[in-house]
Image (tube, coloured by chain):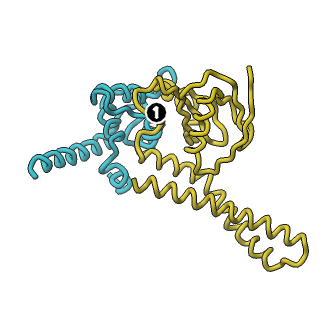
Chain colours: A cyan, B yellow
Amino acid sequence: MDTHIRKVYVPMTETGFYILLCLQQPMHGYGIVQKVKELTDGTILLSPGTMYGSLSKMEKDRLIALIREEEKRKIYQITDLGREVLALEKERIIRLYRNMEEV
Amino acid sequence: MKKRVMVRFFTIPEYERECLFLQEQHRQGWKLVSVYFPGIYLFEACEPEEVVYQLDFNEEGRKELHSYVQIFKDCGWEYLFSYMGYSYFRKPMKAMQQQESIFCDDASRLDMMRRVFKSRMIPLVVLFALVILPQTFLQASQRDGSLHSFFFYTYVVLFVFYLYIFVRFFLHYRKLSRS
């Protein structure tokens, strides 16, 4: 993983985290919006401008890949690099949680 | 259908004020139809309603307009048109559970400003550095005839206008990146 990826994605935004988390299954942008709404009981509502921008940025950085287009909706899936970044983020969140409980 | 034209100027970093202006018109029963020319807006009479207007600046999106617009549509935003690089969207307040915008975090708001900066501000900065700045000083040193005076004042006006845009942009960017 190069320094650019580390600098931009570790730590990452909540939007970035949920995108990678959801894209472990193939999904389109609006699918992610709905999934996140469901996972967070409606607390987090991702917006389309943010979603579109994040998806194209992550595709350019090869964290996710376009697999096909269905009725004008682009379907993406996480790549190996994306999984590496997600694993780092997961470690970071676990550490945060552990420290929060201990201190 | 009754129509009306309004003239309002917003400089590059003022897209948020532009959105509020459009929202205010819709509240008074005038919905946006198109932008003719920078600063010239065409409205059509409609039922007064609280409608949120939003501008995005995404060149990639405009290249693949179908899939770009689709995700906004899915989220309940109506796509109006694109003008001078900006895409216009609106969504009625009654379709929202809370105040919504097309960006949900400051990281993506900053990304949009960076895109605006790259394609809108950099050409201005170049023009400023290569033409306006040297010409202002050149004309200042040659202010003998009335023609020179005319050029001098023209360049001074441009100089001040450009500085104003740069300062606005910088302040807005700093405000966002600090929050």
The quadrant the N terminus of chain B occupies is top right
**Residue A1 visible in the displayed image:** yes
Q: Measuring 62% from the left and 29% from the top, which residue is drawn there?
A: B28
Q: Measuring 32% from the left and 28% from the top, which residue is drawn there?
A: A42
Q: Which residue is label 1 attached to?
A: A48
User: Quick one: which residue is furthest to the left in this view?
Assistant: A102
Q: Chain of mark 1?
A: A
Give the image location of residue B150, x and y in percent.
85, 67
Give the image location of residue A26, x and y in percent.
36, 27
Q: How many marks?
A: 1
Q: Is residue A48 left or right of residue A34?
A: right
**Residue B63 visible in the displayed image:** no
Q: Measuring 36% from the left and 25% from the top, which residue is drawn there?
A: A34
Q: Is residue B168 left or right of residue A11?
A: right
Q: Which secondary structure lies at badge 1?
A: helix
User: As displayed, is residue B78 above or below residue B158?
Assistant: above
Q: Measuring 51% from the left and 54% from the top, which residue is drawn there?
A: B172
Q: Could you say which is closer to the camera, residue B77 or residue B70?
A: B77
Q: Residues within 10 Å of mark 1 (few under 14, many from 20)?
A: many
Q: Could you say which is closer to the camera, residue A21 or residue A41?
A: A41
Residue B138 position by quadrant: bottom right
Amino acid at the residue labelled 1: Pro
Q: Could you say which is closer to the camera, residue B40 or residue A62?
A: B40
Q: Could you say which is closer to the camera, residue A61 or residue B15?
A: B15
Give the image location of residue B2, x and y in percent.
74, 23
Give the image location of residue B131, x and y in percent.
73, 66
